[in-house]
Image (cartoon, rainbow, N blue to C red):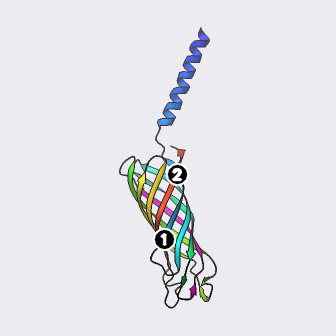
Amino acid sequence: MKNVKRAILGIGILSAGLLSAQSAEMTNMLKIGGNVGIAAPSTNASANLGLDVAYQHLVTPGFGLGIATGYNHFFGKDNDGIENNDFGVVPVAGLIRVYPKQTGFYFGTDLGYAFITGDENVAANAPVARPDGGFYLKPELGWHNRHWNVALQYTKVFTGSKGDLPGQDFNAASLGLGVSYNIPLGE
């Protein structure tokens, strides 16, 4: 009888621990997702496709800070005889998110620096060097729940006049849709 009471007590303690762990609020998470967009406004690229990876810590239930990176591939397009090359954007950024409610609408931005990768020249038939990178900005407005985020995003790398050709400004910007999955890392 003593062993049965101990077993019931042990199962009760274990169950209470599991239930409280499942209901505990997760404040640290890894966000993994993808995005697709149209280059906007651009004469050197047509669209982009990317992968996003971020770590977020909820400072309060409605405010998150973190770091973000990933890769965005921009598809070059021909522009009046200029054969623009594809290029990539690799950001290293801080992440800021505001969640007014536990689920629903949210907004935020990523701010940092982005490296531009790819061919050395902007175009296959023009000897103008592509920029190496610049200030990175990615504001987003979206919907979230505990596991998913879906957002309208604008991505921009400010490169100044680097990579500009006569009749064409180099532009690493897109307007698109992003989806990410939140992987809880604990409290």
Q: Which residues are drawn in magenta? A: 81-100
Q: Which mark is residue 126?
A: none
Q: Disc count in the image? A: 2
Residue at mark 1: 38
Q: Quadrant of residue 129?
A: bottom right
* 18 w.r.t. 66: above or below: above
Q: Residue furthest top?
A: 1
Amino acid type shown at disc 2: Tyr
Disc number lying in front (2 or 1): 1
Distance of label 2 from label 1 (alpha carbons): 22 Å
Residue at mark 2: 181
10 Å neighbourhood of mark 2: few (<14), some, or many (≥20)? some
- Pinpoint residue 148: horizontal percent, then vertical percent: 48, 50
* 57 w.r.t. 126: above or below: above
Q: Main secondary structure of the magenta part?
A: strand
Q: Nearer the viewer, residue 99 or 126?
A: 126
Q: Quadrant of the N terminus?
A: top right
Q: Secondary structure at mark 1?
A: strand
